[in-house]
Amino acid sequence: MTGLLHWRVQRITALINLFYGLYLILVPYLGLPFNINSLLHKSLLTILFLSILTHVRLGMWAVVTDYVPNIYQQVLLRIIDFYLVFMVIWGIIIVW
């Protein structure tokens, strides 16, 4: 992944996370209907989980490649990947 693409994906996922977070905060104040069992909200939560996965993965990749010695980078990145994928799958199972 090129540096520019990495930067763009990081910013796009940050905006998705921000807007959905604001939506969740404002729903009770605006009196909007919120039913977690609706297909719309399940789909939005799935998109949010995938967005968070991508955002955290790119951020952790940058931190690990900058601050961890080379011999440990691949092992640590695989552990982080496994943990993140496990958490996203667990979240999707709970929502659906």
Image (spheres, grey):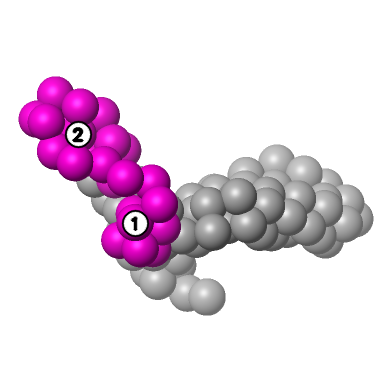
What span is in magenta? Answer: 20-44
In the structure shown, which secondary structural element does the residue marked by tag 2 occupy?
helix
Viewed as shown, does residue 20 lie left or right of 76? left
31 falls in the magenta region: yes
Label 1 vs 2, first from the N-terminus: 2
Residue 69: x percent and y percent?
82, 47
Image quarter (top left, top right, bottom left or bottom right) of the C terminus? bottom right
- In three-dimensional space, the C-alpha distance between marks 1 and 2, rounded to whole angstroms, equals 15 Å
In the structure shown, which secondary structural element does the residue marked by tag 1 occupy?
loop
Q: How many marks?
A: 2
Between 59 and 18, the one lying in front of the other is 18
**Residue topped by disc 2:** 27
Q: Disc 1 residue type?
A: Ser
**Residue topped by disc 1:** 38
Viewed as shown, does residue 14 lie left or right of 25? right
Q: Disc 2 residue type?
A: Val
